[in-house]
Image (spheres, helix red, strand yellow):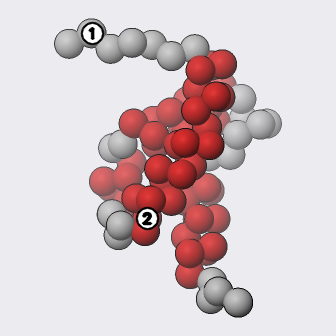
Amino acid sequence: MAQAKLTIGELEAGYPLYCKALRRLLKEGRSIKDIERTVCWGHLETLNRCLPGRYKAPSYLLALIRRDLNQPKH
């Protein structure tokens, strides 16, 4: 099956959605292995690899989101 290649600009435009998807996967209780196999994880890895000064590693984002979800709400 042919897969469309996204440009860096298209990946950058989708960044907020990839972060939202990552948050949702964590809320659903998915395992790290399952999350690492998702499309959003792959796109976040590509952004970090191509523009490391602008985009953090997906594993770092995962830790930030997990910390945010575990903090009690005020």
Left or right: residue 64 versus residue 27 is right
**Alpha carbons under labels 2 and 1: distance apart:** 30 Å
- Residue 33 visible within the image: yes
The picture places residue 51, in percent across and down from the top left corner, at 71, 29
Q: Is residue 65 above or below residue 22?
A: below
Residue at 55%, 42% in the rendered image: 17
Mark 2 surroundings: few (<14), some (14-19) or many (≥20) residues within 10 A: some
Residue furthest to the left:
1
The picture places residue 8, in percent across and down from the top left corner, at 62, 19
Residue at 68%, 46% in the rendered image: 56
Q: In this view, does 42 lie above or below 57?
A: above
The picture places residue 53, in percent across and down from the top left corner, at 79, 36
- Residue 49 visible within the image: no
* The image quarter in which residue 30 lies: bottom left
Secondary element at image label 2: helix
Secondary element at image label 1: loop
Tell me the quarter of the image containing the C terminus: bottom right
**Which residue is under mark 1?**
2
Left or right: residue 39 versus residue 15 is left
Q: Which of marks 2 and 1 is nearer the N terminus?
A: 1
Instruction: Inspect the image, locate mark 2, and give the three-letter code of the amino acid beneath it.
Output: Leu
Instruction: Inspect the image, locate mark 1, and give the three-letter code of the amino acid beneath it.
Output: Ala
Q: Which of 25 and 33 is in front in this view?
A: 25
Which label sits on residue 26?
A: 2
